[in-house]
Amino acid sequence: MKLLWIPMLLCLFNVTACKKKIPQTQPKVTIHEARSLTAYAGKDRVKLLWELPGDTKVSRCTVYWNNGKDSISVNILPGISRDSLIIGKLQQGSYTFYLAVFDSKGNSSDKVSVNGNAYGEKYADSLKNRSIRKADYNVAKGAVDITWNDAAKGAVGTEMFFKDSTGELRNVFVPVYYTNSTIKSFNASKDSVIRYRTLFLPEITAIDTFYTSYDTLKITPPADESGNVDYTIGILKADGKTDTYTLINSVLGGTAEETPDCSHPSFGPHIRQEFNKDLNEPVFAFYLHVTPDNDRCVNFDRQRCEIKTYGPSPDSLKAFNGDQMIFKWKFRLDDGFQPSYSFTHIHQLKAGDGPNDGSPIITITPRYANPEKLQIIHNGDTKNTTLGTIKEVDLTPFKGAWIQAVENVEFGSHGTYSLVLKKVSDGTVLLSYSNNDIDLWRTGSTFVRPKWGIYRSLNHPEQLRDEKVLFADFLIEKKK
């Protein structure tokens, strides 16, 4: 009988041992993911904002980017329902961010993701200050009236700094949707200036504002207390949006373009706008074709594609006897530009009316020669006061380069004149001329007007080719 109990005891022992070896299963830990993860663009950084899950056991959040190569963790403080994090030192570009929530034991939620953008120097360098179309100083109001051109995408407004009538430095903010603004109580002392810059948000919810470099608007003080507008400035800039002729005429007045559109309607407008990479802005492109273009379907021995001020233009843009004016503009002749033996004018100062308004007073003329030349030519009111070619330089350095032109003029029979042409890229002066006693008036005329564009003879068509000359940033300042 004793032998029968032994197998039974062994069996009981084995059953007990088997029960002890069965593993105990742990309940699965669920960590809920964050909600409403949002990214806000910034300067070399991105801000992330999210809502935390309702789990009381969560202790930290970790953000991953660059395919998980970079990460950063933040501890979760008790009692908060939302959290945020700014990730800095980012190169400009687009990023995908992943966010996971952890408890104190290292258990993780599923990751949620969001795309965000960082902006840097490349974006900042692409920004252009909102340009001023026209600025008038009015003595009676003691104010500067400003008309603005359209602003670039992302602009929110322009910040202006100036001294008021008490000499105190002030600033005003002009929202981007304003097309006109007035600087009141302006201090019109000698060499008064307004410094301005434009503010940009690369995205509407961006956390950082970008600023352009400052531009300066110089305001010359009035000569008297008559109440008339004594100092004016007219600005014509391409904007790449407005119809070209409408834009030109909105500044210069009337119908200020003279083109061969009538002779070549299939080509369309001979003055257009295009974006120029060198200046990083829209510019005006003036076109002439050897055939069939002519001079407004009136003269067929020459061709004309120009803009001008003239009778219907504002008086502030016309030169009256004794006026002091400054004309500034940029131009670019193509690398392969071809002038002829005859005239090819790209700028003129010319009487606006009167019996002797035919020949221009001043012209800038590229001329075929060996080597080719750029000439400055003067025609006085009479043969005795005509100086002819007053300056001549090699044309080659002007080709393929943007040139800044600054022309200072005091109009009259014994006027003063200076012209400086320099390369925009490096400031190299290619031509400089001045004369303190030069005939700059026409008997019987009431005003002188500037013209820009291409005006050329067809006497030697074999020397010419279809041309495109670029112009930009016209500015007319006037002081009586």
Image (cartoon, rainbow, N blue to C red):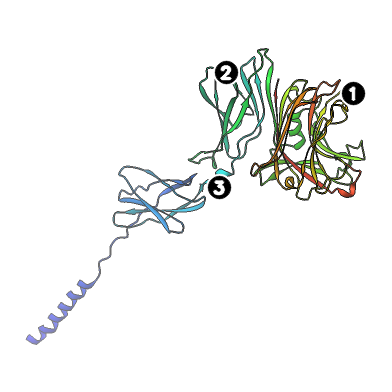
Classify 298 as above or below 191: below
**Residue ID at (15%, 78%):** 13
**Residue ID at (62%, 29%):** 217
Q: What's the residue type where badge 2 is placed? A: Ser
Where on the picture, by quarter, is residue 388?
top right
Q: CA distance from mark 2 to mark 1?
A: 45 Å
Where on the picture, by quarter, is residue 134?
top right
Camera-nearest label, 3 or 1:
1
**In the rendered view of the protein, which quadrant contains the C terminus?**
top right
- Which residue is at the far left? 2
Whether residue 38 sits left or right of residue 217 in the image: it is left
Where on the picture, by quarter, is residue 177?
top right
Secondary structure under tag 3 reads: helix
Q: CA distance from mark 3 to mark 2?
A: 38 Å
**Residue ID at (33%, 47%):** 76
Q: Label 2, on which residue?
A: 185
User: Which badge, 2 or 1, is on the more N-terminal residue?
Assistant: 2
Secondary structure under tag 1 reads: loop
Q: Nearer the viewer, residue 311 or 424?
A: 424
Q: Label 3, on which residue?
A: 122
